[in-house]
Each structure stands twice: as structure tokens, then as C-alpha cells.
Amino acid sequence: MRCIFVGIEYAGKSTLVNLLTNYYQHRKLRVHVDDHFTIPDSTLSPESRAAYVNFPDDVKERMQRMQLQYHVEVIKNYPNTMIAGWHIEELVYSSFYGDDPESPYYAKYHINAQRGYETQVIEARLPDVVMIHVTASDAAIEERMETDPHEYQIIKKADIPTLKRLFQEEIDRSLFTHKGRKIVLDTTDKTPTESLDELLLLSEPLITFGELAVRAMDVPENDYQVRYENGVRKMVVV
């Protein structure tokens, strides 16, 4: 499944990316994970992240624009893709926080290419692209902000209702929504495992027969090796 996770900060996107990645890897499938679109890129070194937030706006905008376009090809070329944030997050945060001197985001430029990125993916006729709108109640987001704050937090508590509305509006405009390739996952009052189970259930009508067969596999809970004996595939706990 080629996953595009979208939604407000603290909704649980990264947690679900990590859980689904582990789910696939435990079934011996390769996964391509890109959870680094929020400024500053979480995969950079601490020194680079600290420098990144102070880059001029035109430099940050150019870097974001290039990686947004680059990941169209990632989605098209890797079967188990985990993309978090991507193009919708960029539009919401840059348009809302672009003029805020306390925010690392840049003012929205004249290019509004969100539907263009989506068109390129849709024209590839991929059978398993799923956009996952991850959301949570205002109270749940506030609680997560207090108990597990991000080093470079983007959102402000007072902005939560407005940001959720902006995400919803942009998701409603998305071509993935119009093509029936969207699911909504509310993580409020759910454990991470419960949210993963719900994600798997909601996405089942949108996956391939091959993935459905993989999900039906009875795999050991512990680490195991795959072996073949007389042409029979076996999973042996190590």
C-alpha cells in the first residue's frame, strides 16, 4: 500500500508510519519511509536542523518545492511507501504561518501545485494509493502537545480548530478524495495499536489482492527466518 498520511501535527501520523513500517517489515516486505516534510527536516542532524529554520524563506521554499516534486516519483516507484505530510501540509502551514516571525514556514508563494502533484500520481494508474487523514480531538492534541512536545513544534494551541478546518478543506479538494482513495482515522482515545488495526481495516477495500494475501498470513510474533523445504515456504522462529 502506498500511503500518504496527512493531518495536523500531534494527530499521530509519525506513530502510524512507524507501526505500519514495522508491520510490513515483520512480514519481510521492503518499505520506503519519508516522514521529513515538516520544517525542519527531522532526518537532518541537530546542527543542520538548527541552521535550517533560519534559512531565507526563498531557500526554504525552493527546497520544499523540489522535494515535494521528487516524491511523486517515490510514490510511483516504491510499492510500500510511507509519506507523511507531503503537499497538503506544506500548503496549510505556509499559508497560515508564513507571515509569523516565530514560525519556520515561509509565506505562500504564487505556485499552488497541490493538484498537480496529485495528477501525476493518479495518471500513473497505481492500484494501491491511499491518502490517510489522521485526526484527533482538540483536547487530545492539546494533551499530546503538553506531555510529549516536539523540539520544533509548528502549531499553537489557539490555532488547533482553525488548522483542523484548513486541513479538512484541502483534503476535501484533493483528487485522491474525489477518486475514493481517502480514509479518515481519528486517533482520539485509542492506543497506537488500536489505531493501526483501524487503519488496516479501513484501507482493506483499497488494497491489492496481493496485499490482502500478505495481511492474511499467519506470522510468528517473534523474529523469524523464511526457509523453503521441498518447495514449501516456512517461517522458522530464531
Image (spheres, rainbow, N blue to C red):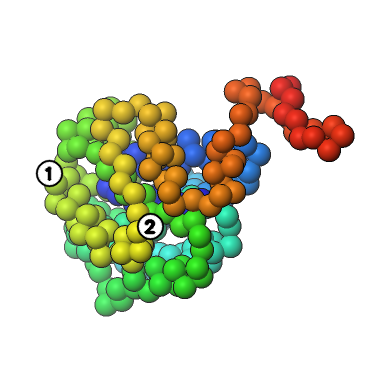
* Residue 158 position within the rendered picture, expressed as x and y whole percent measured from the top left: 12, 44
Q: Earlier in the sequence, mark 1 or mark 2?
A: 1
Query: Measured along the vertical axis of the image, is residue 33 above or below residue 90?
Result: above
Which of these two is toward me, 6 or 9? Answer: 6
**Closest to the observer, 160 or 80:** 80
- Out of 83 and 55, give the one closest to the viewer: 83
Q: Secondary structure at mark 1?
A: helix
Q: Nearer the viewer, residue 90 or 226?
A: 226
Q: Residue furthest right?
A: 230
Give the residue number, with chain letter if any, for mark 2. Answer: 181
| Up/down of 147 relative to 12, above or below | above
- Residue 206 in percent (x, y) is at 44, 52
**Distance (Cα) linking label 1 and label 2:** 31 Å
Is 50 left or right of 11, judged from the image as shown?
right
* Residue at x-position 17% and y-position 45%: 160
Q: Which quarter of the rendering shows the C terminus?
A: top right
Instruction: Check if mark 1's residue and mark 2's residue have beta carbons within 8 Å.
Output: no
Residue at (43% x, 65% y) in the render: 68
* Residue 105 in view of the camera: no
The residue depicted at 47 percent of the width and 73 percent of the height is: 123
Classify mark 2: residues with Cα within 10 Å, few (<14), some (14-19) or many (20+): some
Residue assigned mark 1: 158
Which residue type does callout 2 highlight? Arg
Q: Amino acid at mark 1?
A: Ala
Alpha-carbon neighbours of circle 1 within 10 Å: few (<14), some, or many (≥20)? Answer: few
Q: Could you say whether the residue bearing mark 2 is in a helix, strand or loop?
A: loop
State whether residue 168 appears in this view.
yes
